[in-house]
Structure formats: structure tokens, C-alpha cells
Amino acid sequence: MDDGDLGDNIQQEIDIIEESVSHDRRIGNDDAHLAPNRWWFASSAFPMIAGTLGPVASAFSICALVRPWRQHYTPSQPLKEADFVADPIWLTVINAIQLGMAIISNIFLLLNMTRRVRFTIAQPLTIIGWYISAILLIALLATASGPLYEGFGHLKNELIWSQAFYYGIWAAILYFVDASLMVITFYGASVGHYPNDFNLTPSQRTLMLQTIMFLLYLLVGAVVFSSIENWNYLDTVYWADVTLFTVGFGDFTAQTNLGRALMMPYALVGVISLGLVIGSIRSLVLERGKKQVDARMEEKKRRRIVRTMTKKGQDELLEPIREPRRQDSMISQGAQSNNQLPATEYERRKAEFDLMRKIQAQTSYRRRWVAMGISTGVWLILWLLGAYIFVKCEEDYQGWKYFDGFYFCFVSLTTIGYGDVTPISNAGKSFFVFWSLLALPTMTVLISNAGDTVVKLIRDGTLRLGNVTILPGEDNFKSDLKYIINRCTFGLMYANYTEPPPLNREKKPTSKNSSTDTSDSTTKKEEEKLDEYARGRPRRSETGEDDDPADPRPGQERNNSTFTARVRRSLSRLRDAHEELPTGTNLHFLLISEIQVLMNHLKSSKPHKYSFEQWAWYLKLIGEDESNAETHGKAQPSSRHHHHRHPRRRKTNETAEGVEKDVVSDDTTAWSWVGNRSPLVGSQEETEWILDRLLERLRESLSVEGKKQVTADARRALGADRRRSPDDTYHRKKDGKEDN
């Protein structure tokens, strides 16, 4: 048995697998589009909600502990003057125990978010502590309705629950909700849906600390102002909440000069601190959540479209064009049956790319309006349900009807704060603090979503209406008109005009920038020479001779920095995917220049979206060719059997030596613009994706050049040793003996 080539075969298989893995890493994006949104909520949104509401619950627990739960009240006296009735010692002790457990749970959650304590240790302690606090509070609230009424000289109808009692109710609800959310998060990590950590950015990990600092600021400020103005402490908490949330009802106002003087810096710092917290919450909901939801919605839309095209037999666009014969036949067939059918692989990939862009546009449009609908629904719930609860709290004291609560909630949500209708009951004031902490972030998110949908729709509609009426443009008049008719008829008319024409149309050059155009034209020939030099190819001069860039000529000596800047600017303009790439140092310089351009794109406020030609150029730089179907595959509705890879080889044409070469072509390396491995899917921005791959390509290219240099040096050294003559060695030895 001849096993002489066994080692070569094994090495060949290893090279094939490494090439497959390298290609998969080069093209594949993250898996955000493949993970269901529920596990993103469990790993990101739920920890943020718990980190925000956990300190709120502890703040309410403090309010439930610092004052007794009962007051002696008669209808003839103002509610503010009702006397407190001391709580039994067992209630105070149990209340303090649950507060201590809750604070320990919050500390462990904060240490877990700052990565000071491991996830597997902190989360069980946090969950258990919050559940214990919730259970103890519920037990106290349930038993307090009976035993606390007994053994007193007051009539039962003269005892009312203080604000501290109701703060205990809100704290118990929040503890139970937070613990339940963290149970889901811990379960998802335990079964392996995500690592044992929170999927949060560093700024989002500090949201809990920001919330704690704001609540401490509110509670400590209430202590100061309650002593200055001689207010009940929990009434001062209500006043501080109304002040920092800029509602300003005016039912509680500072009467002393010291209180008024301190109120101004207290309100200024508090409003800024609240703005930071609200900004972090907005960042979570609108920025962090938008990427994940967009990626998942795009994946569902992509699967649905690919599945529909496959069932209807309209998936010719998704099939790579591998053979020239098929391209010729498709040209003839396309001329007869379908003029839109692409004739070459490059055109087919461009059509595929445009299809994916359309999927992205439709998904983004739908996501914005879905987010607008959800935020509007939550806002309406807070408005309508909050109005009902306020009516139940105030009807025994002020005789509120539902419209009174409806009006009060609207004035509060919009921070108008007339002050003509305000809560005076203990339940109403405590519920307002709880309700406002939920309402303000909801209102902020609603306004942000409205800016992306309703406001944008009105602005764009106004511009398009102006384009077809009083301010018509020089072109695209019909496109604007047809698009407006399409939107007004809900797509029944002009069905092909679903995408709006661009609003920012190119303007003709004016005399102001004509000098710039002239200066550009004067340096055009020079930059063309630099282009040819940068590509590593000599340029033919007008006389037919090759220009030697190394020859010094009069007028060509420039400052090195100016020359480098011109070459960099020239390289950034090449971007032709059909041209051959330079090699060696020129390729390195080209990669560095493009990396510089992408770094500037990262600084933009809005993420960049690149055209197909730009993508083809960048893919060319990282080793992909949009005109070559070898690594292109047909998009599938979903990926199956992806736990391990089985690369298969497909033979290509014979080489010059007559030996057939094996090319890796399998389901893992082949990819499509509308496939689940497309660079356009996932949560990573396009600029980040391209930049990562260009940096990797630069590293690989420099590594290869370094190995070549080492090999060349070794060969030169070996050649120098071999050039030594044996006779010379003999004579050197003989001369040495004669000298001795």
C-alpha cells in the first residue's frame, strides 16, 4: 500500500477547513438577527429595568419605614394636620428587616453590573433578597388591615392609612416584578441562550448608579426642606418630586427665604440629574433596542420574502450565475421573457443587494411605526388607568369624577401643571410619586418616536407638497406626485412608487464653486498619474513610452507630506471593483487610506449606508469578488443543520500543469446578500463591519509580506555561503599553516 502522499492529503484537508473557517469569519456578521427578541429582552432590557426600579423600590421602602402607617383623622380637620399613631414594634422590626434585605440585593446587583461580583453568585442573592422583601411587605400589608385597628381608643372610621402604608404597597409590587424579571434573565443564562453576564454597554451599566444617586438626592433634599419649612417628610417627598419633574402644581411652596434660596440650586442640579437618567433610559429603548429589533425584523422579513419567491418559482434572481454559457442563454431568454433578469453575476448581485436594501427600508419603516404604536399605547394606559386610580384615591376627599382625573393626568404628563386640580389624599400623593417615575420616561420615549414617525411624515409631506405646487423642482416632479398619490391611496395607485424619491437633489454648480471645479480639473491629469502609480502599474505616456516615477524631473520635486496627501486622496478615489488591486506596499497604503476614510465615517452622528459599488470595492479589498460566483450561494429561508460544517470540494478547470485544483464551495462559505450570512444583517453597523475586515486584511497582508522578507533574507544568506569556493578555503588553510 502506497501512503507516500498521505501527509499531503491531510495537509490539503487542513488547508481547506482553515480556508472555510477564515472565509466564514471574514464574511459572517453577528448572530443578533438569529436570536429571538425575547432573549435580548431577558439579557439586556430586563436587567436595565430591574436596575432602575430596584432602587426606586428601596426608596419607597424607606418612605414606608420612616413614618407610622396610621393617622387619626376627623372630617372637621385638614388632612395635613392628622396625627400619626405609633406602629407596634413587630411591624417596625419586620419592615426594617425587609429594607435591609432589599438594600443587600441592590448592592449585589450593582456589583454584578460593574463586574465586581460574578453573575452566578450575585443573581441568586438578588432574586432571593427581593422576593423575601416582597413577601414580608405583602404579609405586613395583609395583617395590618386587622390587628392595627384593635386596641385603640379611636373609632375605626377615624383611622386612616398614611402615605407610608401606600409606599409599602408600591414597594412590594416593584420588588416582586424586579425579582421575576431577574428570574427570567438567570434562566436564559442557565440554559445557554447567552453568557453569564448582562448584555449591556458600559454607559448602560452605570444607569443603576445614576438612579441611586438621583433618588438619594431627592430623599436627602426632602429631609432638609422638611426641617426648614416644617413640613411632613412624606409631603416633602411629594413636593420634591413635583419640583424636580418640573410639574410645579403650587400646592406646596417654600415660604421661608432660606427655603426659597435653597430651592433654586436644588432644582437646577436635580433637573440635570434627572435628565441624565432619562437620557440613559432613552438610549436603552431607542438606540440599543432599535438595532436588535431591526435585525430580528429584517431576518423575519427576509425569510418570508425568500420563501415566497421560492414557492412561486421566482427565485432565478437568487441563483448564482456560474457559467458563461448560462450567462449567454440568460441574455437571450431575458430578451424574450424578462428584461429585468440580470445577465451577469455582477448585475445579479447588484439586484440582490437592492432587494436587501428594500427589505431594510420596509422593516425600518414598520419598526418605527410599531415603536410609535407601542409607546403611544403605554402612554395611554398610564393616562387612562392613572386617571381611574387617582379618581378612586380622591373621590372620598374631593369628590373627583373621571374627567377630573383625566384632566389632571394630562396636565401632569405634559408638565403644564396648572395646579387647579391636585391630589390631597395620602394615597393620591404617594401614587403620584410612583406614577410620575413611570410617566416621565414613557413621555420622553413617545416624543422621540414621534420625531421619527409623525414629525418626519409631516416634514417630508410638506416638502413634497411644495415640490409639486408652489416650489416645483427641475426634475422628479412626476415622481413626487406619484409617490404622494401612492401614499394617499394606500398603495392602490402607482404601486411601483413605494420608495420616496430623494429630497436632497443635486444642485447645479454656481459661480461660487466654479473655481473649485476648475482647480480640480487642472490637477486631474496629475492625479491620474498618481492613481496609476498607486495601483502599482506603469502608465503609458502620450509618446507611447513608459513613465518612470523614480526618474527625477524638473517640477516634480515636492514636499513629502504634500505628495503623500495627494496619493492618499487619489487612492481613496479608486474604488473600482473591476480593476486589479495593487500588491505589496501599494496595497498596504491603499488599505490604510481606506481605513482612514472609514474612521471618519465612524465619527458621523448617523450610520453610513454604502452603495453596491462601494460594497463591491470594499469586498474586493478583503478578498471577495462580486463578479465571481465561486463563493456566492443561493439564499435559503432559514439555516438548518448549522451545528457543524462539512466542506465539499468542487473541481474547477485544469491549471497550466494539467492538475485539477480543488476549490472550497459549501453552504458555510457560500453567501448571498439576502441570506442569513449577509454583511447587511445583524446589529453591527456597516462601517464597523467593513473596518474590522479591512484591519484584518491589513494584518494578514503585513504578515505575509513579513514571511516573504524573512524567506528572502534566509535565501540570500544561504546563497552567500554556497558561493564560497572550495579552492579559496584550501588556500586560506594553507596560508594559515605557513604563518605558523
Image (cartoon, helix red, strand yellow):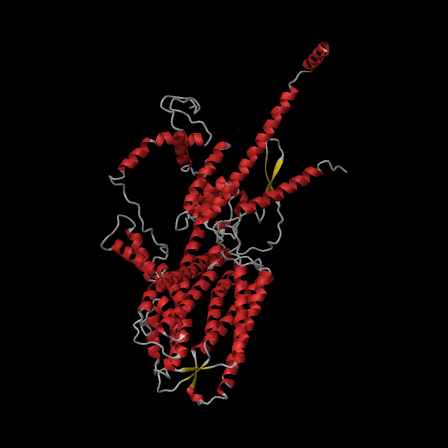
The image quadrant of residue 221 is bottom left
State left or right for residue 708 relative to residue 730.
Answer: left
> Residue 596: percent from the left, percent from the top?
43, 40
Who is closer to the viewer here, 203 or 366? 203
Locate the N terminus and report the quarter of the image it occupies.
Answer: top right
Vertical placement of 476 versus 238: above or below? above
Q: Quadrant of the C terminus?
A: top right
Q: Position of residue 21 (x, y in %)?
A: 59, 46
The answer to whether one can see residue 5 in this image is yes
Q: In this view, which residue lies farthest toward the right?
A: 1
Question: Viewed as shown, does residue 362 lie left or right of 26?
Answer: left
Query: Closer to the camera, 459 or 597?
Result: 597
Q: How many marks?
A: 0
Counting from the top left corner in percent of width and height, residue 57 is at 48, 70
Q: Based on the displayed image, in which of its 4 quarters is residue 239 positioned?
A: bottom left
Extreme residue toward the top, this view: 738
Q: Nearer the viewer, residue 445 or 70?
A: 70
Residue at figure coordinates x 37%, y 63% from the top left: 271
Residue 72, horizontal then vertical, whole percent: 42, 85
Look at the image and tell me whether residue 581 can be seen. Answer: no
